[in-house]
Image (cartoon, rainbow, N blue to C red):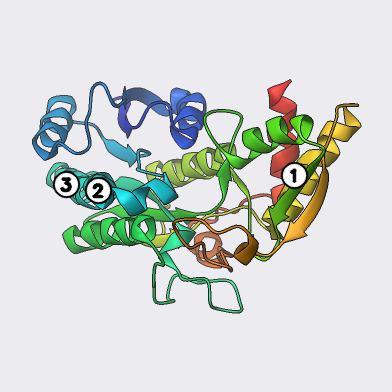
Amino acid sequence: MTDTLKILITGQHGQVSQELQARLQSLGELIVLGRDQLDLADADLIRQQVRAHRPGLIINAAAHTAVDLAESEPDAAFAINAIAPGILAEEAKALGIPLIHYSTDYVFDGSKPAPYTESDTPNPLGVYGQSKLAGEQAIAAVGGQYLILRTSWVYSGHGKNFLLTMQRLLQEKPQMRIVADQIGAPTWAGTIANSTRVLIEQWQAGKAGDWGVYHLTAQGETSWFGFAEAIGEQLRAEGKACADLEPIPSSAYPTPAKRPLNSRLDCTRLQQQWHVSQPQWQDALHECLAQQH
């Protein structure tokens, strides 16, 4: 009988953490540290917590994800997104255990005409992307066993995200204008958690691929307008009110932080190295919507 795997998860109420908690329960003992137990801006506390629990795996599902707010509070964004991951990597390496960390399409500027691969050079447009890239670099500098999983356009039935916002606004307003020139793959947090589980199982079975940076999103692509249309279709199918949607360019909806126009991430390497792939974004959306009822 092998010892139970202790999995330390940072972040408690975030979209990805919630889905991880639901899906990793049967893999071992979950130690979930929310903001009240672990302030990621406190480096000493991070070290104390990891050393007290001595986990067999660390999953960093906590981040400063307020993209526009990050522009006005870069120190907070960098403390959580850049410094903390490096400390977690150091502690994981000292224990000889893997670290799984989530990153973002925002490390790229979105100017490439094709989907981004892991070998493309990052060039973040704003503070959020800069802080997330710095976190990736901090982990890589430490080395050891790590997976940095870049994802995009994360939504779920919990927390604050595009799906829940749209479900509310589409029923409240007669018309809505939605950005149609940013392209990406809406990725359900449940999909991210499912793929994370398979990665852990592969590692446990001695079938790990290479450690490093990987892209992990749903398959397919759409715009925010296309995503909103798909959400609206579901509302109409349920006989609910739904706004008329009008596509607009990003330039008509200025935000403090610039968004990449192309957020598409090529996930081939994850499939090749770890035999992990994700469903089409529409299929995952339908599964997520089915779980809301």
Asked if marks 3 and 2 touch (Cβ < 8 Å), the reply is yes
Residue at 18% across, 26% down: 53
Q: Is residue 280 visible?
A: no
Residue at 47% across, 43% down: 196
User: Residue 85 shows which numbered tag?
Assistant: 2
Q: Dividing the picture into quarters, in which one does residue 181 lie? A: bottom right
Mark 2 secondary-structure assignment: helix
> Which residue position is annotated with label 3?
87
- Asked if residue 253 is positioned above or below residue 3 in the image, the reply reads below
Give the crowd class for mark 3: few <14, some 14-19, many >=20 residues within 10 Å: many
User: Which amino acid type is marked by label 2?
Assistant: Pro
Per the model, the C-alpha gap separating discs 1 and 3 is 37 Å
Give the crowd class for mark 2: few <14, some 14-19, many >=20 residues within 10 Å: many
Per the model, the C-alpha gap separating discs 2 and 1 is 32 Å
Q: Position of residue 275 (x, y in %)?
A: 54, 56
Tell which of 8 and 34 is nearer to you.
34
Mark 1 secondary-structure assignment: helix
Q: Position of residue 146 (x, y in %)?
A: 30, 53
Per the model, the C-alpha gap separating discs 3 and 2 is 5 Å
User: Residue 283 shows which numbered tag?
Assistant: 1
Q: Tell me if 92 is positioned left or right of 22 in this view.
A: left
Quarter of the rendering occupied by the N terminus? top left
Q: Dividing the picture into quarters, in which one does residue 38 lie? A: top left
Q: Is residue 231 visible?
A: yes
Q: Position of residue 229 (x, y in %)?
A: 79, 47
User: Which amino acid type is marked by label 3?
Assistant: Ile
User: Residue 152 shows which numbered tag?
Assistant: none
User: Which amino acid type is marked by label 1?
Assistant: Asp
Q: Position of residue 278 (x, y in %)?
A: 62, 51
Mark 3 secondary-structure assignment: helix
